[in-house]
Each structure stands twice: as C-alpha cells, then as structure tokens.
Image (cartoon, grey):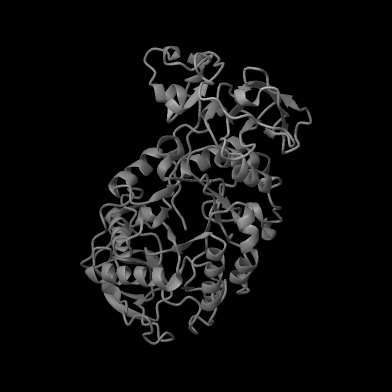
Amino acid sequence: MYTNKTMMQFFEWYLKPDSTHWNRVIKEAVNIKEAGITSVWLPPAYKGAGGVKDVGYAVYDLYDLGEFNQKGTIPTKYGTKDEYLEAIKELKKQGIEVLGDIVLGHKMGADEQERIFAYGNDEYDRNRQISGKQKVRVWTKFTFPGRNNKYSDFKWDWTNFHATDFNAENHETGVYKFIGKEWDEDVDYEFGNYDYLMGVDLDMSDPEVVEELDKWGEWYYDFTGIDGFRIDAVKHIDFNFFREWLNKLREKKEKDIFAVGEYWNAELNILENYINKTERALSLFDVPLHFHFYHASRSNGYYDMRYILKHTLVGTDPELAVTFVDNHDTQPGQSLESWVLEWFKIHAYSLILLRNDGIPCIFYGDYYGIPHDKIKPVKNLDKLLKVRQNKNYGVLHDYFNDCSIIGWSREGVDEIADSGLVVIMTISEGGNKRMYAGKHFAGLTFVDVLGNVDEEIIIDENGFGVFEVADGSTSVYVLKEGQTVPKRSEEIFKDEVEFGALEDIPDGVEPELFFGSNYTNKRIYEPENIEEIFENNVTEASGQSEQN
C-alpha cells in the first residue's frame, strides 16, 4: 500500500489562552484526516510556570496534564487532562498518529527556594568562571503540593540541577553553576558549552534524574496513548540521554516508537554529528533546509535555486529528516524569528510535499493563519496536500539545471490511478522547461492545479512535455480528469535516457553530487554548463541559539 507520511504541527505561539484548543483538535480531526495528514504534533500538554498563559515550554509539573489546581489554574492553555486524552483518542480513531511535545532539559516555577553555594560563569563562555564561591538563594525545590503525590512522589531539589539564571538573594541575573556540579560534556559547543538554556537546568548525570525521567516517559506514553515524541532543545541535553531514554522505552514497549528532535543549527555537519552520537536513535528537523527557504524568499530573485536542497538533511540523510517551512519559533515575534515570506511559501511547501524524501511537517500557522499578526492561511496549501496524497508517487526526475527555474517530475504508479506529477517553479521571470512526465502519458494532457498557468500541456510520444511557469510562481501539473492512462512499461528507459548516464559525469565529480542523493533512482535531463552548476555561490545560514 502506498502512503505518503505527512505531519502537522497543530499549534502556533499566539493561540488564545482560553483552554479550548484540545476541543479544537477534536473538532478538526476528520478534516485533518481528509487533508492527508498522517501524524499530528500537539503542543506541550503539562502545566507550565505561566499557568493558563504558558505555551508549555516553561515546564513546571510533567504529571499535571490539566488535572490539578496549580499555578492558578486547573486547565492548561489548551484545556483539561480529559479533553487532551479525548483529543488523542479522536485523532487515533481517524488513523492519525499523535506526537507529544516533551521538554526535559529544564524546569521553571519552583515551589520553594533553597540557599546553596554556586559559582558565576560567563554567559558567553560557560566554561569560564567569573566569580568565586558565593551563597545564592535559588528557586529549585519542586514539591507540587496541588498534585499531592498522585502519579509520582518524587520531589526535586537543587541537587538534581546544574545551574540557574537568577539569584533571589540580590535579584541579579547570570549563569550560576551550583557547587559540585559540572556541565554535561556532550552538548552543543556554542558558548563553550551550551548545556544551560533557561530556568533550572536538569543534571542528566544524576541517577535520580535519569530514573525519574525514565519513569515519567513510560507513564506518559501509557497514560495518554500517544504514538511518539517531538523532543525539544536536544542540543542542550547530553547526547547520550535521549538515545538511552528512547531505547529503554522502545525495549519495554516492544515498539519502534518514533521521535524527532529539535536541534537548532543551520550547519548540516552539526546535525550529522548528533545523529552519529545518538546512533540514529531519533530523526531531526531539517533546520538547514528551513534557512535555504528563508534566504531564497528574501533574495529578490538572486538565490541560486540549483542549490536549494544541497547541504540539507533531506539531501544527505532523508531517512531521518523531518522537513518544515516554518514553526512556532520562527513565526514573527518569536525567539528564532526567520519567517519565510508569503510569496515563496508554495515554492517551499512544494519542495517538501511533492518529492520522495523526508517527512514533511505542515505548520498550523500556515494552514489556519495567525490572527495575532494578521497572517492569512497559505493559499493553495490544501491543494498541495491533496496532490501529495493522490499524485505524488513513482520514479523521480530532477531538473535542477537553472539558477532561477527548477523542476521535477514523478511518473506515478499503476496501483494509484492517475498518479504522477510535474512541478516547475521560478523565483524570477517565468519561462518553461522540457521535462519527462512518463512515456505512458504520451498523447495525454496535463493541467496546472494551482491555476497559475491556463495552458494545457500535451505529452509527446517520448513522454516529454514543455511545462510553463509564470513570474515568481510555482505550477503543479497533473493529469487532466477524464483520461485513461495505460499501464507503465518496464522498458521505458531502455536506451532512451537522453542525459544523465554515468559517462556524462565530469571528471572528479562524485555521482551523488551530479545526480543528487539516491542517484540510481533519478535521471537528469538537459543540463546546462556543468562547470557553472558547481559554482559555490550559495550563502549558508548561521546558527541561532535560543530555542523552544
């Protein structure tokens, strides 16, 4: 059976704090299913330090899913425990997998203060001590009186943490590392050691902490019935922790539980290092690809589209790549703001939805809009989802041979009627490109489902068509309704590949660089000057630090 996995992040930062979101999920479950969504990433479900206004990343009590009167409220920003469980149940009823958003690196909103000794560390070089031992008063004792030991009687104190950023003794801020504590070594090297992010930082070398988080993970998985996890801020947590945490849970449940981590860095080699260190235990969001989209959208037509998928996770390790255009952190006004401009959204979504690699993640703010910033839903995004669901199958052919106009096609499969597509996009002036749709489509007509080009394209006897694109737009061509497609021939490519054979590769160029990843399953036609194609004129994005 052919199924294209498609994830949706079902929240944005500025949802109203009216505790109705879980009911919104219940109401939308059928529509989400019909749109072709196969998994939903829900926001953090537990009580945050900000009570009903907390988005969920200022973690207070992992066991309070909107059940106890804590932080001035019983429900979270999104609703009550029972509504959350019902939302999960309704999504699963529709055959949609549910991912819980987990934040295990820090806590906030402690119930009591403790007086301890700590050292001041340089905020921009965490390995450099800038003060001697000093007595500090810190918010580190978590007793959860409102929960009264239900589900867990574990109480957190300063010995379970590395550091904090506030001294209540003198109301000064900084990085205060607790006496006798050392940073976890296997973390991101930004600021010398980026173990500490915010709040009070969990000490993952403390056996008590590891045991409690193991217990909580199993409880949360069993209690809610979720299918997997979106894991927050993994670069700030010892790289060994989630490998072991996930493996233990998978062994106990005898399931290959899906997990995707957020490692916010635009450098591919940094993500690859994490994947290697964690022994491929979890997928990662393709942050480098996001920044390609961001820069292309703001390039005024001067971004070289031949490189849009180069040096990305989906281009090098598609099995572990979760691709996205924007999210709750990149939306306007947020800590990692890097919003992809509206005109390029369909370009970007076509690149993640209408190809064969990675798992694409649709952002709630793109699908439903962001009223807080008067941002409307992305026009035609629902059409792309339908094309992905019904047409996006078969052998892929890439035409990334022009700096402004690129395209690709998929031949479709016999098992899915009328499947197959051709995509062409430009970030500058319009034009056309001769591309192979499939010899089985000879004599048939393709139309642009996005409506940007009115002209119908007839496929010639060799399976090619000349596909048009308007200025600064994307066109997605599919078979016009009411036509009959013959069965595909297994000998379509025998002695008929015009370009793209191994002998066409310039000396010194690796095959995967010339053809793209999995090059034996792809064909490239009509390349321009190959030497030009490999000119390195793509600006790489730099990493950013704060994250959720």
How far across and down, in percent of the image, does residue 256 sit? 36, 56
Q: Relative to residue 121, is residue 75 drawn left or right?
A: right
Q: Relative to residue 333, is residue 259 drawn left or right?
A: left
* Residue 124 at least partly seen: yes
In front of the other: 44 or 162:
44
Residue at 41% across, 42% down: 319
Q: Relative to residue 77, is residue 112 drawn left or right?
A: left
Task: Decide: is 114 above or below 419.
Answer: below
Q: Quadrant of residue 477?
A: top right
Residue found at the very far right of the displayed protein: 454
Task: Decide: is 260 above or below 66.
Answer: above
Q: Quadrant of residue 446?
A: top right
Task: Decide: is 322 above or below 40.
Answer: above
Residue found at the very far left of the displayed protein: 180
Q: Quadrant of residue 255?
A: bottom left
Task: Decide: is 64 above or below 255.
Answer: below
How far across and down, in percent of the image, does residue 506 sit? 42, 13
In front of the other: 106 or 218:
218
How far across and down, in percent of the image, does residue 107 sit? 39, 69
In front of the other: 292 or 229:
229
Residue at 55% across, 15% down: 528
Residue at 44% across, 62% down: 227
Q: Tell me how many marks there are.
A: 0
* Residue 135 at least partly seen: no
How far across and down, in percent of the image, does residue 402 sit? 59, 22
